[in-house]
Image (cartoon, rainbow, N blue to C red):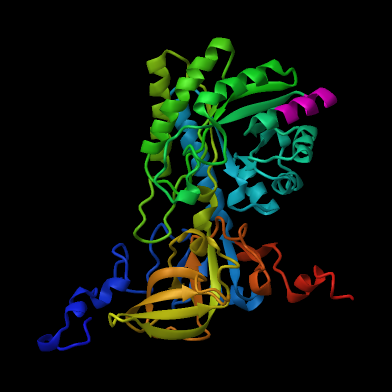
Amino acid sequence: MCPFPPEIVPDWCSVLPPADTLAPDWLALPADANDLAAGVWPASASRDDDGTLVLAGIRSTDLVATYGTPLLVIDEQEVRARANFLRSAFDAAAAAHGTAARVYYAGKAFLCTAVARWVVEEGLAVDVCTRGELEVALAAGVAPSSIGFHGNNKSVSELERAVEVGVGTIIVDSAIEIERLAAITARTGAVQQVLVRVISGVHAETHEFLATAHEDQKFGFPLGEAAEAVARIREVPGLEFRGLHCHIGSQIFGVAGFRESASRVLELHAALLGDGPVPQLNLGGGFGIAYTSADDPTPIDELATGIVAAVADGCAARGIPVPSLSFEPGRAVIGTAGVTLYEVGTTKDVTVRSGATRRYVSVDGGMSDNARAALYGAEYSARLASRTGDGDAVLSRVVGKHCESGDVVVDHEYLPSDIAPGDLLAVPATGAYCAPLASNYNHVPRPPVVAVRDGRAAVIVRGESVDDLLSRDAGVDA
């Protein structure tokens, strides 16, 4: 809003944006800033009679009274239901085209022994990409034969451990890795199944940091070089070539990118059949979820039907059989199951030159428990959790307590104007990539992770204390 009366408006003032332009176009003013948008929250989320957020039958205020804040809450039944639905959807889609599908849970989204057990019990395999993730899966009792091992820089010791325990599939990412595996299998007498990761060149419509199939990046073999890698694998007695792998990115809506990527990879797949079997095709994951009410993710059954049909059509056009298929969702399994609870510390209004005002709401966590907003501008939602807000909706930015201006938790949201210190604030859709990316920046302890189900809560990852931080400092005893 221009601060001058109309009769003396200077030229520069006329180009200033109107007062409401601090809100992005996608953010709609809600009719009620207390509403919980469908699809963004776990299915169990509701409000009780006094407005307190309830998750899986437990009041958020009770959870905070027991476990403190910040607190990452994971709805176990939400994880199980999504895992089961993904498996069923891809099973049905594959069966319709005379083949089979296997769904791996991408552990990088969030992995602990409890979550690993949940997804395995719902019929999923598990995908890991480091020695640490592998050991967590093994500690959870995951059968090694149902583990896939990713990574662009697997060390010799990591590969030795994977071969030793009998990991089902290692996804090979470089020529050096092939030779490392050749040496390990020759020394141990083991036979290791492998897939070759390829770069399809399809640019997913997602953030640059999340797109993994463009040519100039660290993962996989370009399509033009993959045949040579496969030929080398077929020469090694201890390696069994099982097929190709391609992952185009993360937080993707729609089927178009998967369809185009599958078409390109099938060209190579068909060519490789001339020299031997290619029984599998793994098309990765990256299925998007709703972080805000503006997000409209593609339904999982629609994705499954569309992607598998694209593969079947591509195989028919080339006169080749449809291979068995694999997929690796992570975020789509656990993202919506997570809700982070914070306590509000301070609030203040900041007015910019245009006259527009934004409410800054500071909470007792931040980029140490959710780095995604600072890392690549990820958008989130937020709602008061400890009561119903009575004030008008005001444009707000939820920020953390860290010594960085980029320490933003929720960049754009409408919250009740009466939000105040001591209130609880809930941020939904934090189940994926928040706990795994957590840090001790500014020596802030990482929060606990609590699972909720049917009115019960249990810690599945213990939180840290200041004593834990000091215990790692070798100079304390001195």
Name above or below for residue 48 compared with residue 320: below
Residue 216: horizontal and vertical position, in percent? 50, 40
167 vs 282, left or right, is right
In the rendered image, which quarter contains the C terminus? bottom right
* Main SS class of the magenta portion in the image: helix
Name above or below for residue 109 compared with residue 346: above
Residue 288: horizontal and vertical position, in percent? 44, 49
27 or 296: nearer the viewer? 27
343 vs 257, left or right, is right
437 vs 207, left or right, is right
Q: Residue at x 54, y 16 (%)?
A: 272
Q: Residue at x 48, y 43 (%)?
A: 249
Which stretch is magenta? 179-190
Residue 356: horizontal and vertical position, in percent? 30, 80
In the rendered image, which quarter contains the N terminus? bottom left
Residue 8: horizontal and vertical position, in percent? 13, 88
The image quarter containing residue 13 is bottom left
The image quarter containing residue 319 is top left
Q: Residue at x 46, y 79 (%)?
A: 361
Asked if residue 257 lies in the magenta stretch, the reply is: no
What residue occupies the far top of the structure in this picture? 274
